[in-house]
Image (cartoon, coloured by chain):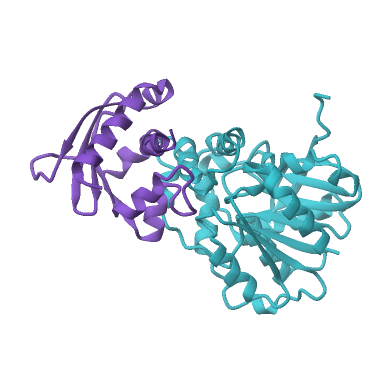
Chain colours: A cyan, B purple
């Protein structure tokens, strides 16, 4: 059947005192799982999981577009401001969505910057969640490139961003999905990828704090692809080792966008991750 | 790889480029000289409107270039492997791992990043054939 099971809706939440109209897609019923996208992209990265007929029998997957991303508009007045995401704004967005959608005991799954936030939530506000799946996530990643290249008037940030992030996609991933993954970066709003990377490459507040995460009450599972050059397997291992009781899986032949770039390889690892959440 | 062999490889990549209409379209505003430095060998690539017009052996202090890609030969060979290993699968892997660097007018590269990366990968395609 050509008609997919994914449903898209909007909800307005207040983040840092400003109204944000959030777009989210969902599918399935049962245990809620919030699925957060990487920097510079949107909820479409999760489309294969949301379209999975077996997984959606037991799980209700909800994949929002962060403010400024995908079909979520920036807040009013955005045209005169520099977009710079912060850890605090990201965490508040997640918590307000849990509240607005009245999600009970959701699993949080996030990739890249979404994975970083998984660790922040596990550390600082674990209560609303059942567990955390931190994909391509680490305690801190300093920039190995100048993020200002992504937003300047004399270069197309989207095309440049896509051409750069292709460095994080495994060559084994199917060509069609490699390009679908890059397309989201090409479509990203001006300055959005840069604004995401700003917090991702500067906020090192998790360093030295990971040992305080209580995985006894809420599991933390990390996943990392061997072709991820931004969060390498070594970065993820360093992070997992610092969290007592956390688990880690290294996924062969896949990169920084596993659920989007190679859904068939990612699926069994994600099924296992969901099972670890109890 | 000897300089003459490297030049021949880039000339073959230039020929392969003519068979890629999308790269000619993407590179239509790319008319620059690029320095490729592999170990102690220097090679100049003369691009004009998305085509590789000429490959010239260096070194030369008289040839101005727009940007340079410097990499060790072993890393470049690994990059050109038909199925490259992690961190050798992209030219930025050279930078991330300290096996190479990119310098010069980075804006010229940024504006044509997809074109240049796909051009460099044509060496891989040849080896896979």
Q: Is residue A11 visible?
A: no
Q: Is residue A240 above or below residue B41?
A: below
Image quadrant holding the C terminus of chain A, namely: bottom right
Nearer to the camera, A259 or B110: A259
On screen, residue B93 above or below B119:
below
Task: Please state if B67 lies on the left or on the right of A67 as rendered.
Answer: left
Q: Which is nearer the eye, A179 or A171?
A: A171
Residue displayed at 52% across by 49% down: A168
- In the figure, is residue B15 to the left or right of A178? left
Q: Quadrant of residue A79?
A: top right
* Vertical relation: B48 (above or below) B105: above
- Quadrant for the N terminus of chain A in the image: top right
Q: Quadrant of residue B64?
A: top left
Residue A175 visible in the snapshot: yes
Residue A66 location, x and y as percent?
Answer: 67, 46
Q: Indicate the position of residue B55 as horizontal and vertical percent values.
A: 20, 33
**Residue A91 spot, x, y in % from top left:** 69, 59
Above or below residue A101? Residue A92 is below
Residue, far front: B129
In the image, residue A140 lies at what x, y percent?
Answer: 54, 66
- State how many labels appear: 0
User: Along the horizontal axis of the image, is A209 left or right of A277?
Assistant: left
For the point 69% across and 62% down, which residue is it?
Answer: A118
**Considering depth in this image, is A257 or A189 the residue closer to the camera?**
A257
Q: Nearer the viewer, residue A258 or A154?
A: A258
Residue farthest to the left?
A: B62
């Amino acid at each position: 059947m050509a008609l997919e099971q994914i449903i898209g809706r909007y909800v307005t939440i207040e983040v840092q005192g400003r109204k944000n109209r959030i777009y989210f897609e969902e599918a399935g019923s049962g245990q809620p799982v919030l699925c957060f996208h990487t920097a510079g992209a949107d909820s479409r990265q999760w489309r294969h999981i949301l379209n999975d007929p077996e997984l959606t029998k037991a799980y209700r997957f909800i994949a929002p577009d962060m403010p400024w991303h995908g079909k979520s508009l920036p807040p009013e007045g955005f045209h005169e401001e520099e977009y710079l995401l912060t850890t605090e704004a990201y965490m508040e967005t997640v918590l307000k969505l849990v509240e607005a959608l009245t999600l009970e005991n959701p699993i949080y799954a996030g990739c890249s910057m979404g994975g970083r936030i998984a660790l922040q939530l596990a550390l600082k506000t674990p209560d609303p969640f059942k567990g955390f799946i931190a994909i391509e996530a680490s305690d801190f990643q300093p920039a190995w490139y100048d993020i200002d290249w992504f937003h300047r008037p004399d270069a197309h940030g989207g095309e440049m961003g896509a051409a750069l992030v292709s460095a994080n996609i495994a060559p084994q991933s199917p060509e069609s999905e490699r390009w679908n993954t890059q397309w989201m970066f090409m479509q990203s709003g001006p300055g959005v990828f840069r604004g995401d990377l700003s917090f991702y490459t500067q906020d090192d507040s998790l360093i030295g704090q990971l040992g305080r995460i209580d995985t006894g009450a809420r599991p933390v599972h990390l996943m990392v692809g061997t072709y991820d050059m931004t969060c390498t397997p070594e970065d993820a291992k360093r992070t997992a080792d610092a969290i007592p009781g956390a688990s880690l899986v290294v996924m062969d032949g896949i990169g920084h966008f596993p659920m989007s770039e190679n859904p068939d390889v990612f699926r069994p690892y994600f099924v296992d991750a969901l099972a670890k959440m109890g | 790889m000897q300089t003459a062999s490297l030049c021949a490889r880039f000339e073959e990549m230039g020929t392969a480029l003519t068979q890629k209409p999308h790269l000619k379209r993407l590179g239509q505003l790319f008319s620059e000289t690029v320095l490729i430095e592999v170990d102690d060998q220097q090679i100049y690539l003369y691009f004009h409107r998305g085509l590789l017009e000429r490959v010239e052996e260096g070194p030369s202090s008289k040839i101005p270039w727009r940007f340079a890609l410097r990499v060790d030969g072993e890393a470049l060979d690994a990059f050109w492997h038909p199925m490259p290993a992690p961190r050798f699968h992209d030219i930025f892997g050279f930078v991330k791992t300290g096996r190479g660097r990119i310098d010069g007018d980075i804006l010229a590269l940024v504006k044509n990043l997809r074109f240049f990366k796909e051009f460099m990968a044509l060496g891989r395609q040849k080896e896979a054939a």
